[in-house]
Image (cartoon, grey):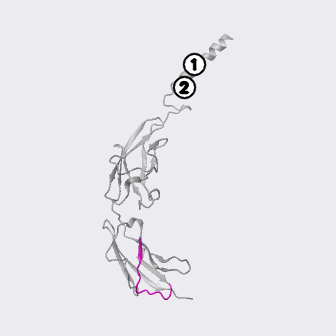
Amino acid sequence: MKKHVFHLNVLFFVMALAFSGCGENSLDGEPKSNIRSIVSFIIKPAPNAGNVQIQHQGIIDEANKTITIKLPQHLDLTAIRPSIIAGPWATVYPQNLEAVDFTADVIEYTVTAQSGKQAVYTVIKDMSYLYSKAQIYALSFPEIIEPETGEPVRALAVESAKTIRVEVPKGTNITHLTPLLELSPDSYNAVFTQPWDTPQDFTNPVSYTLTSEDKSKTVTYTVTVVERQED
């Protein structure tokens, strides 16, 4: 009987040594991952609604542990929520979509591997981004209300033809209408060559020319207003 007890004690001792020697290994015997990287860093419009117009993707320099991201100057940087993807089994702090004050002189993200090892990435802000589109998305006349919907008359632009055709109720005075032009998100800060928010005579087609913020595109749209014919 004593022999069996001795053998059991030896067995428990050996097992204890085996588990204590695992170090960074997990309980199932697999080594814990040392991966501690950021694989994607993007500032998207949805989590930053009302502030960010388009998606801005960071350029990750893995060797130097930096993330360079180009942003426009008009952004409110006090609470930016980046979309972050870390490497497998790794965690990142500040976390994905957590609001971070990007006005700080130093912006750092710490990535922790499954093994506990860490890497620190520094964000480099480049505030020189300029929007490259010159696109009118839609036109409306706030003073003209659709009888059926109760909403202002509105029409989408035909981008391929650079035209906008607006139908207004029969009897509308189209000689003195003030349009509201809606630009696409990536056309932010585009400049018109003539005022567009003043009354216009739409008896004949009216053209609007705009240039992108980075001055790479100049586009002209033609707006035609017609009275809707009653059945």
- Residue at figure coordinates x 49%, y 28% from the top left: 23
How far from the left and from the top, in percent, is residue 176? 40, 85
Say which amino acid is labelled 2.
Answer: Phe
Q: Which residue is mark 1?
A: 13
Give SS at disc 2.
helix
| Figure quadrant of the C terminus | bottom right
Q: Residue 177: in sight, yes or no?
A: yes
Segment colored magenta: 169-182
Q: Which residue is mark 2?
A: 19
Spatial separation of the CA atoms under disc 2 and disc 1: 10 Å
- Answer whether residue 96 is magenta in the image: no
Residue farthest right in this picture: 1
Question: Considering depth in this image, is 64 or 78 the residue closer to the camera?
Answer: 78
Question: Considering depth in this image, is 16 or 195 the residue closer to the camera?
Answer: 195
Question: Considering depth in this image, is 46 or 159 the residue closer to the camera?
Answer: 46
- Residue at figure coordinates x 65%, y 14% from the top left: 5
Give SS at disc 1.
helix
